Amino acid sequence: MVLVNGGSIRVDLPKGNFTWYDVQSLLPFANTIVHIHMTGAEVIQVLEDALSNTLDLEGSSGSYPYAQGFRSTVDCSKPKGSRIVNPEVNSRLEGTWGPLDLERTYDISTTNYLALGKDGFVEFKKHPNTNTGVQYTDALIRYVNAIGKPLTTPPTSTFSTQKFIDRHGCDHSIVPSGQCPEPEPKEPTITSPAPTTLV
């Protein structure tokens, strides 16, 4: 499966001819592809850490994880460790979807940047990796040339986030964007000052 951060993907692709300039605008960094072997439980840890970087540690929203061959519900209203719900895998999208096996070892493709534990993907740096030396821009160009047909939007069933629930509990797979109710403001906590003793 493939795991990357949303911040590494910079623009949407417009309809029309797909050029070298589009590739550089989409993936502007000099990242190379790295392979890491991890158990299913460790994969979940990577994803939980990446979400926590934004939700708990006030890190960049670019930490949000994207995947290929993996899908789940993301519930940001839950505490760290329980935000990835119903994780499923489908290697290379060539078979059928099935539950992620927490004990099985998976071959993960990511970038050399994330392999260093950057952007909240701290679990990655705990594991040895193999750097292919292939820039991810080159890999995309090779893929486009290999399929020999226009790129199309993949089916939503392959999206890594099947359902997104924000930190306030609003399910964005049901409620249209921008229409979630405003969360109730929290009442300020008022504490009495500690008594003082006059001498």
Image: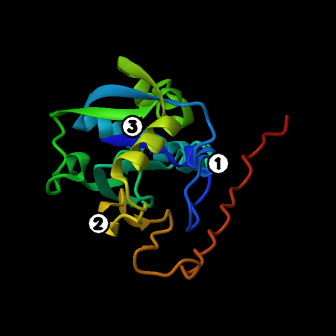
| Three-letter amino acid code at the position of disc 3 | Val
Q: Earlier in the sequence, mark 3 or mark 1?
A: 1
Relative to 67, is 156 above or below?
Answer: below
- Say whether residue 80 is visible: no
Relative to 63, is 13 above or below?
Answer: below
Q: Comparing marks 2 and 3, which lies closer to the viewer? A: 2
Q: Earlier in the sequence, mark 2 or mark 3?
A: 3
Percent x, y of residue 20: 60, 46
Residue at figure coordinates x 58%, y 44% from the top left: 27
Circle 3 sits on which residue? 46
Residue 155 left/right relative to 114? left
As drawn, which residue projects farthest toward the right? Answer: 199
Residue at figure coordinates x 29%, y 66% from the top left: 157
* Secondary element at tag 1: helix
Pick the quarter of the image with the N terminus. top left
The disc placed on residue 153 is none
Percent x, y of residue 115: 46, 26
* Secondary element at tag 2: helix
- Say whether residue 189 is visible: yes
Relative to 39, is 181 above or below?
Answer: below
Are discs 3 and 1 less than 8 Å apart at CB?
Answer: no
| Three-letter amino acid code at the position of disc 1 | Tyr
Percent x, y of residue 70: 29, 50
Q: Earlier in the sequence, mark 2 or mark 1?
A: 1
Residue nearer the viewer, 158 or 78: 158
The disc placed on residue 21 is 1
The disc placed on residue 157 is 2
Residue nearer the viewer, 90 or 127: 90
| Three-letter amino acid code at the position of disc 2 | Ser
Near mark 2 (Cα within 10 A), the count class, few <14, some 14-19 or many ≥20, is few
Near mark 1 (Cα within 10 A), the count class, few <14, some 14-19 or many ≥20, is few
Pick the quarter of the image with the C terminus. top right
